[in-house]
Amino acid sequence: MQVIGLLHPGEMGSAVGACLTAAGHRVLWASQGRGGQTQARAHLAALADARTPSELAVRADMIVSVCPPHAARDVARSVTGFGGVYVDANAIAPHTAREVAAIVQAGGATYVDGGIIGPPPASAGTTRLYLSGSAAVEVRDLFAGTALDARIITADMNADVAASSLKMAYAAWTKGSAALLLIARALAEAEGVADALGVEWEMSQPGLLARCRSARRSASAKGWRWTAEMEEIAATMAAAGLPPGFHLAAADVFRDYPRDSPATGA
């Protein structure tokens, strides 16, 4: 059994934590400054409360960060001095991942880059955690037999942020295409041809109307989190010499999308 700190148990993070507790590990979280929804998720996932990130850092052998992309650096700074294995499993650009790595390595930690693809893991075969870095094998083995399929891209120190690169490339399509569908539908609504577009989609693009409905539901529930992710993808594109404009526009789509509920309590 290892003691693992989880920062912070949102919808995805709590499901990752539940996988670890199911595997017999003790998982800590920090309740300081967190809302009621997070506390409820932590309780359901059988997480133990360390109260503060600094106390969590003292007690944990490993820390897993699963948070909105814009918070990745601050979460890393909250456990300054932690000397174990630090896993950043956030949707961030390779450049941002290297900044996070520098923050935790300055305090003595070993950095492992991670990228989650799929929904919050509840059953086997739905969700992958891709890993890269020198301690990737150690992290992968923690999830053996759980609903989260942990896979190593590489343990090569020269490919330190391969997992983040893969996550950016994957989400560039999945969430980027969702933004394109939403803006196409918005144009049709603005011009009064939404019904006609829906009929044409059903004839020439079977399944696209259902995908658009799914994109609307997802954007209403999660778009506030996706805005920063689109900005991270745009930065990744620019760093690779590719056009960043599409994903900057996608960030605008998600930023302005009406929410089903506020992000407070996450």
Image: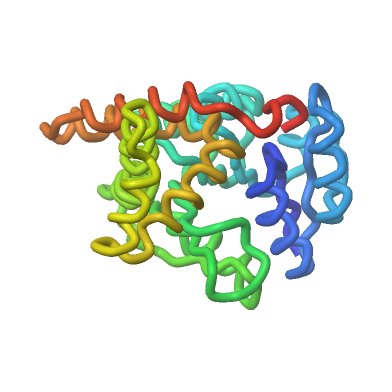
Q: Which of these two is toward me, 228 or 107? A: 228
Quarter residue 145 falls in? bottom right
Q: Which of these two is toward me, 70 or 96? A: 70
Residue 150 horizontal side relative to residue 152, left or right? right
Q: Position of residue 150 (x, y in %)?
A: 51, 66
Q: Position of residue 19 (x, y in %)?
A: 70, 63
Q: Identify the residue at image location x=28%, y=64%.
A: 203
Q: Position of residue 229 (x, y in %)?
A: 42, 34
Q: How many marks?
A: 0
Q: Identify the residue at image location x=47%, y=47%.
A: 215
Q: Quadrant of the N terminus?
A: bottom right
Instruction: Please indicate, yes or no, whether residue 157 appears anywhere in the rendered image.
Output: no
Instruction: State how the image is colored.
Output: rainbow
Q: Identify the residue at image location x=39%, y=38%.
A: 182
Q: Which of these two is toward me, 114 or 104? A: 114
Q: Position of residue 55 (x, y in %)?
A: 80, 31
Instruction: Please indicate, yes or no, whether residue 197 appears anywhere in the rendered image.
Output: yes
Q: Quadrant of the C terminus?
A: top right
Residue 94 horizontal side relative to residue 100, left or right? left
Q: Residue furthest left?
A: 241
